[in-house]
Amino acid sequence: MNDIQTIFQAANPVLNQTPYPMMILNAEGIVVAWNRQAEKTFGYASEEIIGNFTPFIEKEKENFYKGLWQKIIHSVDSIQLDSMALHTKKGESMNVPIIFKSFTIENSRFVYCQFLLISAEQREIVSFNEFSSIREGLESSFMMLSIDQEGLITYANDLFLKYSNWTPKRIIGKSFWQMFPQAADGSSIADVIWKDLQNGKQWKGEVEKITKDGQSYWVDLIAIPIYTSAKVLSSFLTLENDITEKKRLQNRLEKIAYIDQETGLMNRYRLEQIVNKMISNNQHFTFVYFSIDKFYSLKELYDNQAEKIIFQEFTQRMKMYFQDSSMARVNINEFVVLTPLGEWFIQGFLTYLKQHPIYVNNTILPLSISGGITKYPDDQISFTHLMKASHATIQKVQAEGGGSIVSLTKADHKALHTKSIIEKRLLVALDKKDLKVLYQPQLDLKTGKITTVEALVRWDDEEIGTVAPDVLIPIAEETGLINDIGSFMLENACQQAAEWYKKGIDIKVSINSSVREFRDKNMVKQIRKILEETGCPAKLLRIEITEKFALEAEAEASIIKQMKQLQNDGISFVLDDFGTGYASFRYMQLLPLSQIKIDQTFVSSIQYQPKSQKLVQGIIQFVKSLNMRVLAEGVETQEQQDLLAEYDCDAIQGFHVSHPIEASEVEKLL
Ligand code: C2E
Ligand code: CA
Ligand code: CA
């Protein structure tokens, strides 16, 4: 081995580090160095090639290259060739740009040749770099969120934080839903987006969002499911652009123009004006409300263009059928017609739609319409109430499957009226803290002691009298006031439990909770705060949830997460009204429950019905096999108590033990 060879061999590790394939030739054109990238690219190992002529120059070009070679070897500057025809060991030909640079070592001339090809690994690095610059580009122009499989946020970029007012630390672990406002019924567009993502679909559209402090803003949103390389859904990404200004402008324009841009119908503001005018003229009319059923699923069947067609065609048919009546679009998929026409004629619209179907992409659109008929002044006497009654009617129709046009009964309208009064008075009650708490004791059948009391809300209003919880709670849930009732009850119950605790009285307090309260992602924080402020140990607090709650919690990972956090704190959960809902073994395993309450309907019949006896006995055994405690509620007689004790039930609650009573009365029973 001569000195020169030794030099090149020593240089090999360095040559291997260059990202490009390269070789070094001596003045005769013999290869003296051949790096690893060259091995990979051309398929020749260095042993085969060092000491030989380059075997990969295409034969027919050899003469041409000879002339070039002379030029290269004598040139001081480097020479670049845009394309040289080479072939790999496998015989594939490739055109490769090359740079040549000659140099001298110990009086011998050499040529350094660098093939300007990037190796596969190198390409990966480049595409990674490219990817990060794409990401940088996205980050600087979009608000961006990464979301995990449970719907919890794992990353938010600066723009997102800026708009939403969240701090980087706080937002991590918050749920995707928390970024959206909730509709009155507790639903949110987030549910629709989430469903698509779960199904591996993208979602695109304009949505309203809320900042940390509840301020609304509008964005153009794209939500994308992200797959791992194994095609497994791993996470989700949202990209958003602020369009609040555009929305504001649009709103302002709509208000000024009073026209719905898409259908040319009058908009909600104009409708309100017209209705108010008719009311002030005491002009009688029928307020007909139409809603396109399952609009979002319907839309899914088609492309974006279809949406426009659906609205325009539907409007066309409404105009044809109702002719001279006033018509408005009041919501995306909702319309109002003001007409003097009778009920039978209005209902005939559905038949008319069947006879004149809407075609999208040459197929008949499976359109289903729900309608509500409300009369002024017979049924309702203001625009707001006409709207509210219409919503209630549509809800009723849609709950029964949709596809019909109905009017509410007199009794329904009366109930709506009562409801709106209750809503108003409840606001006053919450403000004045007019609610109060009664406690109903639970008797432990093993020890014969009262160990827990259930906190039940009571409301006596000076204007409307006593409102039973059965009436109050559903209305409060619908209006969102349940959260205020919930915190009122929690505060009072914890205060009471702490007071007993300080007096050395060992008694737990059980409170009722609705799923809507747990949708508030601050629930855990709020409970912890109240426990701390009142000095109530967490182990003294029980939270009762219903089966409906359980069913929804099962579907929303963030609710279960919150429950588990509270359970870790020492709070226990009770499944209330067991047997009246959708008793599912799955959620009984999934949720952190420690006790089941058998509903009073079962208890009231055990004395006389052998079937109920068997059922209750079975439930008790089953619950115990899951290592949970079991309580029976609505126990009104000694016979019921005895039977339950015989069946090995742990505890009972009911009028036989005590009615719900004031806290001071509870102490007397101990
Ligand atoms: P619940 O949680 O099943 O509460 C038990 C209900 O049965 C109470 O009615 C109680 O007064 C009644 N009850 C107790 N023992 C007997 C008995 O031996 N026989 C009969 N026939 N009834 C008995 P209440 O207080 O009218 O509450 C009705 C429902 O309202 C409760 O049912 C609960 O679902 C809800 N509720 C009450 N307070 C609250 C609250 O603070 N928050 C929430 N979210 N819901 C509440
Ligand atoms: Ca309860
Ligand atoms: Ca119950």
Image (cartoon, rainbow, N blue to C red):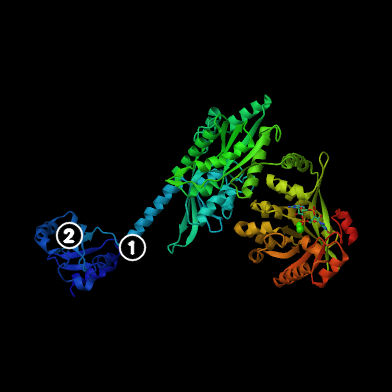
Along the line of sight, which residue is nearer the eye, 210 or 389? 389
The tag earlier along the polypeptide, 2 or 1, is 2
Which mark is nearer the camera, 2 or 1?
2
Along the line of sight, which residue is nearer the eye, 201 or 353? 353
Pointer 1 residue: 121
Q: Position of residue 231 (x, y in %)?
A: 44, 62
Pointer 2 residue: 85
Give residue 97's mark. none
Q: Position of residue 121 (x, y in %)?
A: 33, 62
The secondary element bearing badge 1 is classed as helix
In which quadrant is the N terminus drawn? bottom left
**Quadrant of res 305:** top left
Question: From what the image shows, is residue 7 above or below residue 438?
Answer: below
**Quadrant of res 123:** bottom left
Label 2 and label 1: CA atoms lie apart by 23 Å
| Disc 2 residue type (three-letter) | Ala
The secondary element bearing badge 2 is classed as strand
* Image position of 658 (left or right of 147): right
Q: Position of residue 559 (x, y in %)?
A: 63, 57
Question: From what the image shows, is residue 54 above or below residue 238?
Answer: below
Q: Residue at x 67, y 39 (%)?
A: 389
